[in-house]
Image (spheres, grey):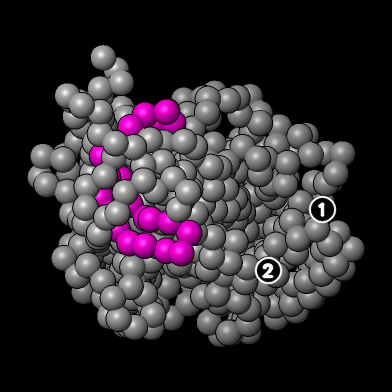
Amino acid sequence: MTENLVYRLGQNCELEDIEVGKTYEVKVQGFAKFGTFVYLNNRIKGLIHISNVKTDHKEGDTLYVYVKNIRDNGNIDLEEVRAPSDFEIKTVSRKAVPLRLCDLKNKVGRNVMLDVEVAQIKQTSGPTIFTLVDETGSENAAAFTEAGKRSYPEVELGDMVSVSGEVMMRNGQLQIEVSHMEVLTEEEKEIVRKRIAEATEERAKPKDMPFLIESEVLDRLKPEMQKVAQIIRKAIFTNQPIVLRHHADADGIVAAVSVEKAILALIRDEGGDMDTESHLFKRAPSKAPFYEIEDVTRDLDFALRDNVRFGQKLPLILMMDNGSTEEDEPSYKVAKIYDLPIVVVDHHHPDESTDQYLVAHVNPYHVGGDFGVTAGMLGAELARMIHPGIEKEIMHFPAVAAVGDRSEAPERAKYLELVADKYTEDECKDIALALDYEQFWLRFNDGKEIIKDILNINGNEDRHRRLVKLLVSEANAAIEDQLKASMPHVKDTKLQNGAHLFTIDVEIFAHRFTFPPPGKTSGEIHDILCKRNEGKPVVTLGLGPDFAVIRSRGVLMNIPKMVREMRDDIEGGGVSGGGHLVVGSIKFVEGMKDVVVDELVRKIGEFPVE
Ligand code: MN
């Protein structure tokens, strides 16, 4: 009976659904010198060579063909046959395993059909470029109606579509030349959306692996870090841009560059090039130790432009060495209006109220740790979760972060030990100082390649050494210069709790608008005074016209709490600020300087000493 079966290829069928040795019903499409072209379905064509044509026919006629061969290039050789008498027609439907984007590399030159999500729509001066994603990756599809005219205007960013077309290679990149694109029905959409979302979620899960060092705090942070890694990986897999905001100091830079490396490596793995990188990832240092309105405004402005101009999704905001405190909330509120998801990896003392704005929040204070587990340590470990392949290159980053942020946690020694054969503690300190110094001159720029040289990940060790040496000697000369001017003006008093209070007016007794800035100047002065007062509690205040920098040792302070109380208690003081528990800063209005500073000194004198 099988001889009496004739197959009709379903419209959704692929080349794979056609079997050699079977008979199919086809329609004549056109004629060539060497034979007759026929359609097996709307998209798949085959050739009956002239030697295998048996009857006369015209365009649109129905014929029956025997499949002799399917060549590697996808060409189908057919032989015309007479319809068997008393035959039965059987419609072939698409095989159960549908095509995925990762399969396209084996389909060059062939017609394909897939159900995918539209992750970007970019109108060029020629075709419209759709970036498609599914659970296996992302590829571009080009559709052309007229130069510069949007094809398939009904298809929108985030739609689930069925795409048909030929797979081509363009400049070494796969691309589908679209012959048909259609938004899926509500019912189909949900099935595809669920399929892609679930599989992407699974694929984005980071591999479970041990940290570079043993640390109880890190162990307890692991679930939340894995969550952040998964969110970042998922953003990359779904073509969502990432904006990485970080504190502009050595610890923040190290944290951010670790994650930057991992993200770019993953984008590359996904077939992205330099162009993709610059559209999908941006690292930006923040001058303030929090997400300023100025920063979020800039980020939002760029994101919305890219959304309109390049049809890009709105970004994921990743905050590093910043983001845990109340000071960030005004910016988070702006981001929330546009539904920008925000993820924070920070080691500043966190405020509970910020969590309502965050998708995930890694902070050692959440698990009984403190600022000694620095953002740079967290960043390097997080980067390994995002892309384990980058581990070797960034191995020394946490040690640089540890000395840069003066960590006194047990993790500091372990990270230093980890790279002791390549970098001494002093070398790590030099790198940290060089980062701080260079970032001062870079201001709002990320200084991508220079920073890589300072961190010795550009593959030019000689240049790295010479650059760090130069920057360190310049930075030290500048610091020395500053201290020479400032130190004679330091005032020494005693607080009621017995601590030494040193005050220095950094506005009138320090060089302005140069390195070291007021915070660093105060820190350097504090270090000298700590050495001079070995074993005693010391507080140093660097005073400006409308701010004070607070450095302390041996006093059990809570700067964020103190600043908040003063904000509420001093009417017309315009008080704001924060930072770490024992290192931070406070801002106020200039006319209230005396009132605010007096109250600040009184409050510091009330904290117990160690
Ligand atoms: Mn830090």
Residue 571, image quadrant: bottom left
| Position in image of residue 279 (x %, y %) | 45, 67
Closer to us: 330 or 29 = 29
Q: Tell me which amino acid carries mark 1.
A: Glu
Residue at position x 72%, y 47% in the image: 393
Viewer-proximal residue among 413 and 294? 294
Front residue (pair 385, 58):
58
Residue at image x 52%, y 28%? 207
Name of the residue lying farthest toward the top: 1
The residue to which callout 1 is attached is 427
Local packing at callout 1 (Cα closer than 10 Å; few below 14, some 14-19, many 20+) is: some
Residue 449, which numbered label?
Answer: 2
Q: Amino acid at mark 2?
A: Glu
Q: Residue at x 53, y 82 (%)?
A: 507
Question: Can you tell which mark lies on residue 353?
Answer: none
Instruction: Give how far across and how far down residue 363 sits, in percent.
Output: 43, 40
Q: Residue at x 85, y 44 (%)?
A: 422
What stretch of residues is rendered in magenta?
A: 17-44
The kind of secondary structure element at disc 1 is: helix
| Residue 232 drawn above or below residue 139 | above
